[in-house]
Image (cartoon, helix red, strand yellow):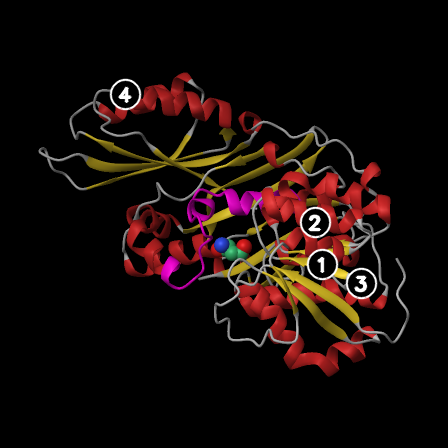
């Protein structure tokens, strides 16, 4: 759909939470700059949200109010529908589909929706010639979608990894710096407004997995395959693990890692020990960071605010300006029908080193029993540390291994868990030195 040059691009915004209000505030503050950059103005014409009366700190009086966001997407006086409702299905999906079917451009910050339905939505957009932008869906204000789709388009990307969830990075940073337990620090993150409406999406790794599935598709030219992501969260990480990590020369980060090999694509989100001097180890608090590896460019690292009204609005507006200026790149870097079927590799074939923490009864022969389990699976131990000596209470024992396979390691963990002297399931954290 072409729009006459000079006429303002008109937006209908569905969802007026922190990000929706941030988009309106940004347009108000930067109107002249946006006009210069797009060659035309950017104007909000219509809005829709659940609660009309709520004070959002922005003036909505000049916008047409719609109670029904789907009707707005189809019928309002607009060129672009900005979907900021959230959720993988339901209203958000209906809004995007209605807008695309009507040939209206869509800009969305909805990672869950794109992780589950991104390829189908791209096909839908291509059918009517609408644009579909989702810069804001991954890493908030960090422009990694555009970087992969356009800035790095001359490269074959072999790996993308990063800190994709600010809430988890904040929690792990606070736990390490203060020694406070997980639940206490999660409550802080919720009070500060970092966490998702359902914080289990953050702490169980789902939010990061949504974002990783989108990045994999852009990086490797494969259909979005959220089901192919191995997902683990940070609930089982104790302050003690952060202390042991320090002793061993690591920090613990919840990483999303996607790699392309001759065998297929591996996608995994899990707590990861990274060397203290790795670039990603320096990323603290709610900050997000993504590192990519391209065959001609080498390593590229982007970092910045991964959440919040201002940063996410910044990403939404980048997509809006592309539409306004008539700039188009294929939605996932290539046309939807050129996306390969993802050959997602199972976690069992992963190879790497491991950290394992056990709580054991401190009696003679326990370590011999543990090492016998490792020997039986041909897993080689790199180091072992025991903390404390108390015949009445279990003690913590930590081991690191040399590189092995996930399949062997799962056998080891089952074998160790079955030992009488081991009083709780082992905590396992993968080590990544790349
Ligand atoms: N809850 C998300 C985070 C917000 O903590 O990173 C942005 O997706």
In the image, the segment drawn in magenta is: 189-214
Q: Position of residue 151 (x, y in %)?
A: 77, 59
Q: Position of residue 143 (x, y in %)?
A: 67, 61
Rounded to the nearest angstrom, the CA distance separating label 1 from label 4 is 62 Å
Q: 275 and 64: which one is in front?
A: 64
- As helix, strand or loop, the secondary structure at mark 3 comes to helix
Label 1 neighbourhood size at 10 Å, few (<14), some (14-19), many (20+)?
many
- As helix, strand or loop, the secondary structure at mark 2 comes to helix
Q: 207 and 346: which one is in front?
A: 207
Q: Position of residue 98 (x, y in %)?
A: 73, 48
Instruction: Say whether disc 1 or disc 4 marks the residue closer to the N-terminus.
Output: 1
Q: Which residue is mark 2?
A: 96
Q: Which residue is mark 4?
A: 369
Q: Which residue is mark 1?
A: 81
Label 3 neighbourhood size at 10 Å, few (<14), some (14-19), many (20+)?
many
**For residue 323, which numbered disc appears in the image?**
3
Q: Are marks 1 and 2 in contact (CB under 8 Å)?
A: yes
Q: 337 and 236: which one is in front?
A: 337
Marks 1, 4: nearer the viewer: 1
Marks 1, 3: nearer the viewer: 1
Name the chief secondary structure element in magenta.
Answer: helix
Q: Is residue 393 left or right of residue 228?
A: left
């Amino acid at each position: 759909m072409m729009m006459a040059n000079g006429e303002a691009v008109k937006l209908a915004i569905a969802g007026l939470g922190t990000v929706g209000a941030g988009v309106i505030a940004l347009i108000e503050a930067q109107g002249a700059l946006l006009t210069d950059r797009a060659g035309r103005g950017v104007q909000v014409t219509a809005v829709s949200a659940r609660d009309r009366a709520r004070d959002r700190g922005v003036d909505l009086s000049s916008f047409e109010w719609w109670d029904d966001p789907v009707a707005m997407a189809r019928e309002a006086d607009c060129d672009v529908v900005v979907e900021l409702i959230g959720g993988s299905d339901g209203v958000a999906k209906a809004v995007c589909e209605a807008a695309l079917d009507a040939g209206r451009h869509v800009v969305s910050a909805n990672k869950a929706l794109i992780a589950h339905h991104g390829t189908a939505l791209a096909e839908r957009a291509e059918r009517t010639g609408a644009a579909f932008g989702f810069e804001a869906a991954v890493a908030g204000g960090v422009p990694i979608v555009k970087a992969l789709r356009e800035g790095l388009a001359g490269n074959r990307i072999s790996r993308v990894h990063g800190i994709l969830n600010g809430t988890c990075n904040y929690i792990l940073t606070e736990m390490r710096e203060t020694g406070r337990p997980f639940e206490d620090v999660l409550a802080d993150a919720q009070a500060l407004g970092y966490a998702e409406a359902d914080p289990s999406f953050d702490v169980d790794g789902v939010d990061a997995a949504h974002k990783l599935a989108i990045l994999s598709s852009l990086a490797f030219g494969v259909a979005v395959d959220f089901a192919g992501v191995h997902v683990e969260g940070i609930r089982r990480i104790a302050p003690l693990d952060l202390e042991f990590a320090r002793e061993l020369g690591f920090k613990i980060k919840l990483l999303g890692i996607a790699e392309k090999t001759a065998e297929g694509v591996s996608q995994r989100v899990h707590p990861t020990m990274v060397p203290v001097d790795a670039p990603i180890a320096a990323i603290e608090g709610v900050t997000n960071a993504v590192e990519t590896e391209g065959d001609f460019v080498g390593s590229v690292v982007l970092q910045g605010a991964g959440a919040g009204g201002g940063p996410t609005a910044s990403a939404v507006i980048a997509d809006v300006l592309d539409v306004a200026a008539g700039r188009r790149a294929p939605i996932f870097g290539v046309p939807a029908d050129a996306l390969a079927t993802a050959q997602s590799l199972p976690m069992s074939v992963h190879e790497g080193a491991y950290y394992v923490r056990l709580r054991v009864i401190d009696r003679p022969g326990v370590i011999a029993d543990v090492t016998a389990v490792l020997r039986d699976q041909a897993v080689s131990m790199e180091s072992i540390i025991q903390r404390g000596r108390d015949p009445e209470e279990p003690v913590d024992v930590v081991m690191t291994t040399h590189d092995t396979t996930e399949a062997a390691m799962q056998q080891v963990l089952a074998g160790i868990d079955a030992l009488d002297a081991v009083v709780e399931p082992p905590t396992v954290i993968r080590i990544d030195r790349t």
